[in-house]
Structure formats: C-alpha cells, structure tokens
Image (tube, rainbow, N blue to C red):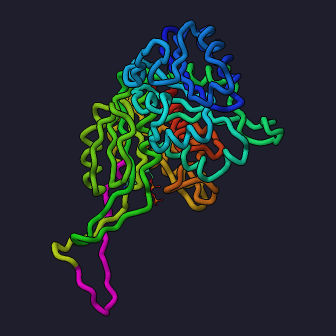
Amino acid sequence: MLQGKKIILGITGSIAAYKAAYLTRALIKKGAEVQIVITPSGKEFITPVTLSALTGKPVISEFFTANDGTWHSHVDLGLWADAMVVAPATASTIAKMAHGVADNMLITTYLSAKAPVFVAPAMDLDMFAHPTTQHNLDLLRSYGNHIIEPGVGELASHLEGKGRMEEPDRIVAYLEDFFKNRQSLSGRKIIITAGPTYEKIDPVRFIGNYSSGKMGFALARCCAERGADVVLISGPVSLSTPHASIRRIDVETATQMYEVAMAEYPTADAAICCAAVADYAPAEYSDTKLKRSSDTRTIVLKPNKDIAAELGKTKRPGQYLAGFALETDNEADNAQGKMRRKNFDFIVMNSLQDAGAGFGGDTNKISIFKGDGTTVEYPVKPKNEVATDIIDTLSEYLSQ
Ligand code: CTP
C-alpha cells in the first residue's frame, strides 16, 4: 500500500523524536519515499545526519540551506506529497497547525499540503489532557486531519498516562489502512442527508432542532476519501464541505430535502439518512412577521414526508439504505422497529442516555443493528472514527 508513496515526515521537538528514526525506516522498508522536514527544536532531539542517512535525502529544516543558498519551496513540497505525517507532534506544533502560525518550514509545508495529513501527538499526560490541546486537536480534526491517538503508558517524565507517541509500526499500519481503503468506494455513488431542517413559520422564525450536521459531514468525508461520488444533502449548518470531491446540495426544509433525495437516489448505490428531519411543518406560512399578542398562540402542524421511508419504498436489489435512530428510551426496540418500517439494511442507534453520544458534540457512541439480526456495539469515539465504523459496515453490504 505504501510502495512508491511520497511521504513528508514532519518531526518536532519531543523526546519521542527518536521514534521518528524507526518510523522513517519502517516507511522506507514498505517502499515509500520519505522527505523529512524537521523543526528547529526537533534538531535538538535527533540529528539530521541520522535521518538523512536513513532517507538518502537532505533533511529540510530552514527555508534556505545556509551553505549553498538552496531555497526550499514549501509549496512544491506540499504539492509533491501523497501524505504528510507529523510524528512526533508536540503541543506547540499542534497549536501552530491549528491556528496557522507559519513560523517554520514544517508549518508552511503543512499549510501548502493538499495531501491527507496525519498527526501523532507526543507529550506529557497533563499537556495532552489540557483543554487547549484537546481543543486544538478538535480543530485539526475539523479541518480533516487524521489524529493518530497517543498510547497510554510510562512517559519521559516517569508519570503514567496518555501521551506516548503511537508506535512506528502502528503508524505505518494506520497509513496502510488509509491507502487500502482509499479507492475502495471508487465508482460508487453515495447520498448522505445531514443536519437539521428548518420549517418556516414566518419570514424570521422556524421550527428546527439541535442537529449540527457533524456526523453526516464526517460520513460524507469518509466516503469521499474512499473514492466515492458523494452527494451531501445538507440542511442549514455552519460547516464547510469536508472534501473537495463532494457534491453538496444545501436545502432548508424537509420537503426540499425529500425532493433532492428522491431525484438523486435512483442513480445511487446507497444512501445514509443522517439528517434530523422535522417530522412536521407549520400548516400555514405567514408572509409577514407574526405580531405579539397577549393571547396564547397555536401553530397547526402538518406531517412532512418521511424521506428515509420513501427512499426505502423505491429501493431496488443491489441498492442499500441506512439510517439513524437517536433514542432516549427503549432504544433497541425503537431502532429495530425503524429499520423495518423504513426498509433500512442497517440502522445506527445512539442513545441520549449515553455520555458522549448524540447532537452537537464531537463524539458519538453507537450500536449498529443489521437486518440479519446481528448487532455491533462500539465505545465512545470521535465522530470521524464513528464514521469509519459506519462506512466499513456499508462497504460490507456494497461488496456483497
Ligand atoms: N428520517 C427521514 N425523514 C423524516 C424523518 C426521519 O429521512 N421525515 C430519517 C432520519 O434521517 C433517520 C431515521 O429516519 O435516519 C429515523 O429518524 P427519527 O427522527 O429517529 O425517526 P422518526 O421516524 O421520525 O421517529 P420518531 O421521531 O417518532 O422517533
């Protein structure tokens, strides 16, 4: 999987920099071409001589090589790479990446890179757990970078905890998995509905819900990274499109979402209904802003179309359909009932009873119920990793 892949390995000032030498060797053994970019403090921990002996190339650290005046173009380097791996990534480099503080060659290269970026943090447990670091990692995730979680164990400080850079062999395995899956959905058209819908009451008011769209956007990104043609039908969210190849169609109401989904599904291989669609819309829309009055006010609601159920009615052999159930009680029965009613092949259930699950946050805890009666339960994970589990399940169906 890594044969011939051009990889920028960014090394920063952490004691774990010694592991970067093993990582370099492991990548080269797999046939990758490695260009090392090291920060000034990285050089305090491991010498460029060791690294360039392993890669057979000069290590880049400065914008200019002082002795021969060679200018290193971070733009060319960023475009050259098939992947950029920052390992070890210190709290400082993670912060600079998150906020675009481009004061060294590694960060300018990162900002220029079009390739997927993998970040393997390495630091003391308290630094890793600090809300600042966690927030910066969340920012990096939200930009589409892959965070290779550090391991738990003894740290350089002799404290025990989470912060050890992931082992080089595991990082290599992570990259191999990424490249293996990369084209696995090539030629497949997948529809994802995401976010809330807004049902208008008058020009300034609507009925909506708390859905952020993050889960649906993570699914769309995961499918796009595997080479699928993704149509992301999104209700009103404040998220940017997570992958350049995604065709995004923004809608506002359930009716608009229904129309787009029904038009796209006949030519699709699969759809995942992730949107939190309003089940009802105001029966009447007022063209003018409703005025306050001291009386109680009643808004009569009419039912919206159940998009998932309508897609389920048109599903043909070889086409797949999956959906979500966000439940507060009687979770398994409710979810399985929805799966049958809507003709889903599988349903992803999250319970508001579980910490770390549901709307708005960056994590989710899911169980997947399949049509054949089997269930898989997963631990709390970042939404990007949850998306990987869901798309792995969809891929199993698509390869049947
Ligand atoms: N769904 C949909 N269109 C709707 C309502 C729901 O496509 N009008 C989809 C959701 O995207 C989700 C699944 O159906 O994949 C279940 O949504 P949920 O709101 O949990 O189900 P409902 O059928 O609305 O049931 P209830 O609100 O009674 O729990």
Residue positioned most to the front: 67
Q: Position of residue 131 (x, y in %)?
A: 61, 53
Q: Is residue 186 above or below residue 340?
A: above
**Quarter of the image where one finds residue 203:** bottom left
Closer to the camera in the image, 282 or 110: 110
Residue 124's quadrant in the figure? top right
- In percent of width and height, residue 7 lies at 51, 18
Residue 227 magenta:
no
At horizontal 34% and vertical 57% (from top left) the residue drawn is: 197
Residue drawn 39% across the image and 27% down it: 114
Would residue 200 appear left or right of 332 to someone viewing this image? left
In the displayed orientation, state which residue is furthest to the left.
287
Locate residue 104 relative to residue 246 in the image: left or right.
right
Q: Which residues are magenta?
A: 290-308
Q: Position of residue 110 (x, y in %)?
A: 46, 30
Q: In this orientation, does residue 1 appear? A: no
Is residue 295 located in the magenta-colored stretch of the structure? yes
Tag count in the figure? 0
- In the image: residue 91, left or right of residue 99: right
Position in image of residue 355 (x %, y %): 64, 56
In the depicted view, which residue is nearer to us: 107 or 369?
Answer: 107
Q: Residue at x 36, y 30 (%)?
A: 269
Identify which residue, 138 or 338, lies in the foreground.
138
Report the predominant secondary structure element of the magenta stretch: loop
Asked if residue 80 can be seen in this view, the reply is yes
Residue nearest the observer in this picture, 283 or 56: 56
Instruction: Report the residue at 31% width, 71% height from top.
Output: 301
Q: Residue furthest bottom?
A: 294
**Taking the image as four quarters, which one is ligand 1 found in?**
bottom left
Answer above or below: position of 318 versus 102: above
